[in-house]
Image (tube, grey):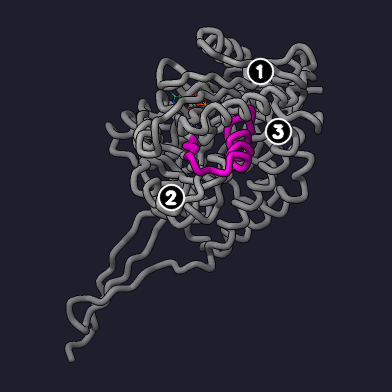
Amino acid sequence: MPIALSNYWDGAWHPGAGESIERRAPARSDTVVASGAGVSSAQLDAAVGAAAHAFDAWRRLGIERRCAILRAAAGILSVRAEALGRELSHEQGKVLAEGVAEVRRAAAIFDYFGHQSKAPVAEEYAGPTSQQRLVVSHHPVGTIGVVTPWNFPIAIPAWKLAPALAYGNTVVWKPASHVPLLAFRLMEALEEAGLPPGVLSLTMGPGSIGQRIVESSQVDAVTFTGSTEVGRHLVETCGRRMKPIQAELGGKNVAVVAEDADLDQALEAILVGAFSGNGQKCTATSRVIVDERVADTFGRMLRERACALTVGDPLDPSTEVGPVVSSPDQVRIQAVIDAADGAVTVSAGDRRPGNGWFVNPTVVDLERPKGAFWTEEIFGPVVALVRANDYAEALRLADDTPFGLAAGVYTRSLDRVHQATEELKVGMLTINGPTTGSEPHVPFGGWKQSGFGPREQGSEARAFFTKSRTTAINAGTSR
Ligand code: NAP
Ligand code: MG
């Protein structure tokens, strides 16, 4: 039986009066996972109004009591990690182990921000005279519009909602249309954790609902993760309104394999980087640049292992690569593969249920940079291989993209590590490990067209979710 979806605002569940929603399982397109309806424009306005109205009481509650609710949510998500991970895998298509791990990650994020009540809340500086102290304090922004993508249905919402709420903001959240069930589950967990009425509104619906949130005069700031195309449009929309926006966008992430790399170690890291999440992570490895002295050997190793990956039902524990998120995405990705020269696309372990949206893990040997495989974010289980004459050329090619999210460098040379850290224009750099991955206590985000505004998570989350005030305190008597 499909799960019946609902929207949430003002402390109550509301059946939607807007567009109908029906999510099918990517591995079994005849199975409906969840159905319901998104909000109408009038319902959205009520949900925004409820969040705006709740702001003053929520900010005055104090950070310790807000954080206690987030810690309770972390506990609920931990207990439910297996069950929610299974639903995530069924709804989104990533393999079961990754679905469960993502729910645990969401719990860890709520736990991390649930402890921010113990972090310093202000900084003090000396004034120009001994009579004056300067105190920099941090205050909630107001009501935040949150718009999230489908590729991490619970972790990305967690890393926006948790800091927004901890620092005293209220939220209106529109999840991606492909993953309504996990949004519904996260809202349930937060309600059970004791979130007061109005503090969080969950409003499902198409992009136009996200657009209406962003444009609302009652929404004070926007945090968005998704494509560069939509992100650019929202940055322009917010710019006209002088509304702060944080946008985490697309990538064309690179792995650089130096001549001295441990090729076995690089291979394992690149397989995870390219094919985990079925290749649909913003940090997925999509270009591999190999020093030509080891390129034939490494190319052979990568093709062999990619072709041996087991493609199938994500709920089957033996599956290594599941389906992509939708039928149009399957058609789009397959068309790019079919148009490429030198694509090796074979799947040795094929265990597909039959009517899912599958794409074979694919390695394309481009030899030199060219075409869509080099320039476009394909967002599927595909990776392009290119040869470089030497390490310096490899680093130059790595930056040959308007994106700047993630890079991996594979080398045993300290000198090459130094060069990479100096030269690569990316927000996330991994030495001898997968390009994918993040931790809640350190910043996450991209340079160039991969990100706009302050980074997410860690010490930088507060920069976006609060406004600072400098207070000059002078002694009350002249001494
Ligand atoms: P998307 O198409 O840009 O959609 C993202 C969200 O924006 C969805 O909730 C979408 O709603 C909504 N939306 C669409 N049009 C809108 C509009 N005009 N106004 C307001 N909201 C609108 O991205 P996606 O396909 O979900 O996700 C894949 C992309 O996200 C990739 O490019 C990937 O690289 C990027 N990503 C980046 C990061 C990062 O941290 N840098 C992390 C994850 C993903 P609907 O779902 O209803 O269309
Ligand atoms: Mg999209």
Q: Which residue is mark 3?
A: 88
Can the viewer see residue 4? Answer: no
Percent coordinates x, y for residue 321 in the rendering: 70, 27
Label 2 CA crowd tier, 10 Å (few <14, some 14–19, many 20+): some
Q: Nearer the viewer, mark 3 or mark 1?
A: 1
Q: Are marks 2 and 3 in contact (CB under 8 Å)?
A: no
Residue linked to disc 2 = 417
Which one is earlier in the sequence, the residue at label 2 or at label 3? 3
Q: Is residue 96 above or below residue 38?
A: below
In-image side of 275 versus 83 (left or right):
left
Callout 3 secondary element: helix
Query: Looking at the rendered structure, which numbered label has been put on residue 63?
Result: none
Q: Which image quadrant for residue 247? A: top left
Is residue 137 or residue 50 the one in the foreground?
137
Q: Amino acid at mark 2?
A: Val
Side (left or right) of 39 relative to 167: right
Lower position in the chain sequence, tag 2 or tag 1: 1
Query: Is the CB of mark 1 within 8 Å of ligand 1?
Result: no
Quadrant containing the C terminus is bottom left
Amino acid type indicated by mark 1: Asn
Q: How many marks?
A: 3
Q: Alpha carbon of mark 2 to alpha carbon of mark 1: how far?
A: 33 Å
Residue 248 drawn at (x, y percent)? 44, 37
Q: On the image, numbered disc 1 is attached to which residue?
A: 360
Q: Is residue 419 magenta?
A: no
- What's the residue at 68%, 22% (across, down)? 307
* Residue depicted at x 18% and y 81%: 129
At a point 45% along the width and 27% down the height, the residue shown is 387
Find the magenta span and give its range: 255-278
